[in-house]
Each structure stands twice: as structure tokens, then as C-alpha cells.
Amino acid sequence: MTQTFREFGISENLLKSLEEIGYQAPTEVQAKVIPKVLSGQDLIVISKTGSGKTGAFGIPMLEKLNHDLSGPKALILTPTRELAVQVDQDLKSMSKYKPIKTTVLYGGHSMVQEIEKLEKGVEIVTGTPGRVFDHITQGNLKTGSIEYLVLDEADRMLDMGFIDQVKRIIKKIPSKRVTMLFSATMPSEIQYLCKSYMNSPDTIEIESDT
Ligand code: ADP
Ligand code: MG
């Protein structure tokens, strides 16, 4: 049974951009994750690279969020600048016909340019933990209106030594939020992170042979 994005209640403006970028039907992880995010459920998603995880969190967030520059509404943490840039580009393509502003923050990028973007106002911020934490402590990134927190490639963030920084960031985000953690594997530190910082999460595991 092939499902469609339309069946999940995705709006025309997003359907149009998804069609343009060649997302004709949801991947398995998208089909399982999108309805849960739309209903506000915290999620742990175990799924391999290339399975379509950016759309799994990006599409429902873009559906729920509206243009409102009063402060960022979503924060996505990724282990590397390349991934952060990719996620931000994917979100921009998916929201081509919806007035949502996104920006990306990562070490090695111009602080001044990043601050300018944040000051103009954005709804979705994607970044690497070190740089995101710097912007939070400097007061450039206001966390008080964040409603969605995504930890993308959580196992790689752990491997790269970002876990304490991730925890420090989470503590600055309002506890009334939707938290989603994506990982290819579930080391015990990640399980502990989920227990401590998520609200009765559902676990979705996608078999890796698909
Ligand atoms: P992951 O984060 O799981 O590694 P990505 O979200 O980066 O996966 O997606 C992997 C590739 O699949 C990308 O090239 C993306 O554009 C493509 N893709 C994602 N969702 C769909 C879809 N529904 N239909 C077609 N291609 C898709
Ligand atoms: Mg990914």
C-alpha cells in the first residue's frame, strides 16, 4: 500500500515543493514519523543513512510552523557542518512556497553573518553543537520560543564528543516541546539521553534491509 504525503494532511504549498524536488511518495521512515510529529509525539527513530530522515522531521515541522519571526521555533543539531548545511538546504527546498525562514550555524562560518541572519528573524535553526551553544551563551540565539528540537545523527554526535554540549543546549530549551532523536545505532549513552530529556518517547525502528 503506497501512501501519499497528501494523506497525512500536508498542505498544498508543501506538496508542490515536494513534487518539484522529486519526493513523490513518503519513504518508510517518513510514513511512520510524519503522523507522529504532527500529533506532537516525542520520538526516537533508528534508521540508516539515506532513508529520508530529513523529510521525516522536516516535512511535519514545516507543516506545523507558520511565519512568525518572534523567535526561533525549531532547532536541529547535527554532528558536522556539511550535514547542517545539507539539512538547511533541504528545508529551504521543501519550504519554497511557504514563508518560513531558516538559517545554519557552524564553526568556521562567519559569526557576524550568522548573527545578522538571526537578528533578521528565523523560524528554523540548524547547526553544530559547539557553534549553537556559543550563540546561545552570547544571547544571539534566543531559545525561549523553541517548540521542536531535533537531534540528528545522535550516535555520531556522541562519537565526536558533543554529548555534553548537546545536554547543555537541551537545558536551555523550554521543556514543553517536541523532541526527536535520530540515530543509526542506540549506544547506552544515547538511551540515557532519551530517558532524561524526552517525554514518553515512541521508538520507531526501520529494518535496515529496505
Ligand atoms: P538520511 O537523513 O536518512 O540519511 P536524507 O533525508 O538525507 O536521508 O535523504 C536521502 C536521499 O533521499 C536524499 O537525496 C533525499 O533527497 C532523498 N529523498 C528523501 N525523501 C525522499 C522521498 N520521499 N522521495 C524521493 N527521494 C527522497
Ligand atoms: Mg540525515
Image (cartoon, rainbow, N blue to C red):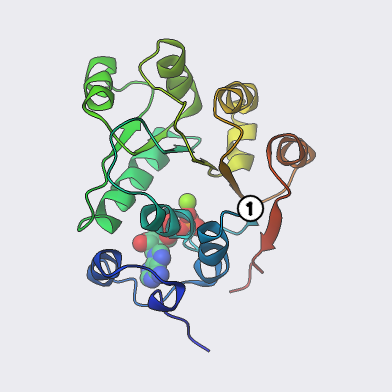
- Vertical arrangement, residue 38 with respect to residue 147, above or below: below
Quarter of the figure with residue 16: bottom left
Quarter of the figure with residue 162: top right
- Vertical arrangement, residue 157 with respect to residue 61, above or below: above
Q: Quick one: which residue is furthest to the top in this view? A: 138
- The reply, left or right, for residue 17 in relation to residue 139 is left
Residue 79 percent across, percent down from the top left? 51, 35
- The reply, left or right, for residue 28 in relation to residue 200 is left
Q: Which residue is mark 1?
A: 43
Residue 70 percent across, percent down from the top left? 32, 31
Residue 14 percent across, percent down from the top left? 29, 64
- The reply, left or right, for residue 106 in relation to residue 3 is left
| Label 1: which secondary element | strand
**Is label 1 within 8 A of ligand 1 (CB to nearest ligand atom)?**
no
Which of 11 and 93 lies nearest the eye of the viewer? 11
For the C terminus, give its image quadrant. Answer: bottom right
- Vertical arrangement, residue 160 with respect to residue 177, above or below: above
Quarter of the figure with residue 135: top left
Q: Residues within 10 Å of mark 1 (few under 14, many from 20)?
A: many
- Vertical arrangement, residue 15 with respect to residue 121, above or below: below
Q: Residue at x 54, y 57 (%)?
A: 37
Circle 1: residue type: Leu
Which of 76 and 9 lies nearest the eye of the viewer? 9
Residue 133 percent across, percent down from the top left? 48, 19
Total numbered labels? 1
Q: Residue at x 70, y 57 (%)?
A: 202
